[in-house]
Amino acid sequence: GLKINIDGYISFKIRDVEEKLAEMEIYLSDIVAGTEQVLLPDKEYKLYLTSGEYKNRFFLNLASVPTDIPDVLPDNELFTIYSSHGILKAEIFSLPGEDGTLKICNLTGQIIFVTKVYEPGYHEFNPGIKDGIYIVSYITGTKMSSKKIIIQNQ
């Protein structure tokens, strides 16, 4: 969280970074503004804020070097997914491996929910997680696809 005692401009930037983090992409997410700003190299995110407390608005994200799993092209989509009253409804189109793994991560990269998928088709999942924006990834064989989803339990 962030607490500001007077109105004014605030600037987020990185002055120094350890060598092992220098290879990573580091960016700041502003949930209210809906923006993401890369902070390296020598970039900053500046905005005007009124005095007050800002909880769960700003997140620092670290993205490591990509894995060797290739991105899936849009015309070769592995799955679609949406949320209705907290229930995830997925259509699994492809299962090139013996099974697949569906995982949900929050915007900081923490894994919130993981389940196995053993056959293509329509599936429903009740992960029992709070309202918010999440990343759903489906991995099967040597393919992976991820989608951003908004979950609302109401």
Image (cartoon, helix red, strand yellow):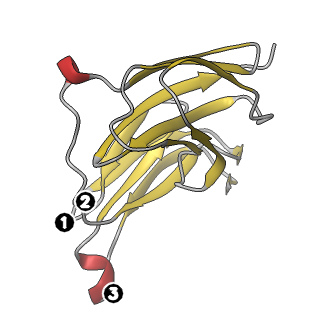
Provide the secondary structure element on which disc 2 rests.
loop
* Residue that label 1 marks: 41
How far apart marks 3 and 2 lie (CA) works out to 19 Å
Q: Quadrant of residue 103?
A: top right
How far apart marks 2 and 1 lie (CA) works out to 19 Å
Q: Sequence order check: which comes first, mark 2 or mark 1? A: 1
Q: Sequence order check: which comes first, mark 3 or mark 1? A: 3
Q: Which mark is residue 66?
A: 2
Provide the secondary structure element on which disc 1 rests.
loop
Decide if residue 84 is on the left or right side of residue 106: right
* Residue that label 3 marks: 18
Decide if residue 109 is on the left or right side of residue 141: right
Tell me the kind of residue under disc 2.
Pro
Mark 2 is surrounded, within 10 Å at the Cα level, by few (under 14), some (14 to 19) or many (20 or more) other residues, namely few
Tell me the kind of residue under disc 1.
Pro
Q: Residue 8 or 152: which is nearer the viewer?
A: 152
Q: Residue 122 or 103: which is nearer the viewer?
A: 122
Tell me the kind of residue under disc 3.
Glu
The residue at the point 81 percent across, 13 percent down is 154
